[in-house]
Image (tube, rainbow, N blue to C red):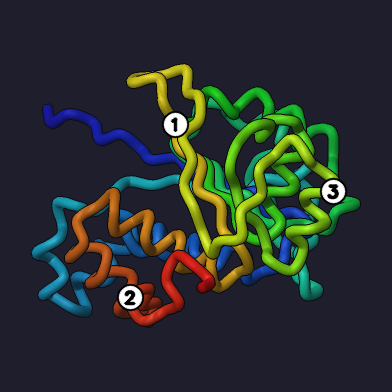
Amino acid sequence: MPAQRKVFRIGVMLEEVQLSDIVGVDIFGNLSREYMDLVKTLLPSSAQYDEHAMDMEFLYLATTLTPAKMTPGITYQPTVTYDACPRDLDMVIVGGPVLTHRPPQAEKFMKEAWNRTPVWLTTCIGSMWLASTGLLEGMKVTTNKEVLDLAREMYPGVEWIRQRWMVAERPFDGPGGKGELWTAGGAGAGVDMFANYCLEKYDPGFVKTLALEPLEFNPESSNGQFYD
């Protein structure tokens, strides 16, 4: 009997978040086994990357399982609550909700999952949401450049850097003992961050053929990692 493939589980925190903040999730979706099985029937040449496709599960979080809100005027169906979501995911993606949206259930989830999930990615002011838990104290991170001064005022224990996206090492109670935090500025910078993460971690030809080219996300022609 063939060994059962590990499912790569991604938690997405999108309650009260602007839709563009999480557009990069589609890059991961295009690298999934489900997408590969669909697309290789339409584009047989993509089958050369079949071995790279990953079994993925996307968990869309919210405070309750009742339909939740995003902007602009979007309602989505959560698949799991913060309380019920496993803490030992493979990745958590944090979009940027309005600063008044700070449900205690989300804070509890972030604090309990922080050391048990190896990779965290934030876009826009999602890093400020994460900073509100105290988990980013002493770390170098970024956020939407338009609110950098506000972020420094609200969370002075965090070193806020003016950069489109950046990577920091962080604790992880698992193999290797080291996790990663990827933080991005506004939504466009977030898309480039997602793309660069995938290009770094997975086969570049696979990422470009299955995700970046069909989605027309091209970080190589963007503004890069830095503003200046």
Label 2 Cα neighbours within 10 Å, binned few <14 / some 14-19 / many ≥20 = few
Disc 2 or 3, which lies upstream in sequence? 3
Label 3 Cα neighbours within 10 Å, binned few <14 / some 14-19 / many ≥20 = few
Residue under label 2: 220
Query: Could you tell me residue 85's position as x and y percent?
Result: 62, 32
What is the three-letter code of the residue carrying label 1? Gly
Name which quarter of the figure residue 140 lies in: top right
What is the three-letter code of the residue carrying label 3? Glu
Residue under label 3: 153
Residue 37 placement, left or right of 124: left
Residue 77: in sight, yes or no? no
What is the three-letter code of the residue carrying label 2? Glu
Disc 1 or 2, which lies upstream in sequence? 1
User: Measuring 85% from the left and 40% from the top, which residue is drawn there?
Assistant: 103
Query: Could you tell me residue 87's position as x and y percent?
Result: 57, 27
User: Measuring 71% from the left and 61% from the top, which residue is drawn there?
Assistant: 76
Of residue 211 and residue 51, the one placed in the foreground of this image is 211
Alpha carbon distance from label 1 to label 2: 26 Å
Residue under label 1: 179
Name which quarter of the figure residue 59 lies in: top right
Alpha carbon distance from label 2 to label 3: 34 Å
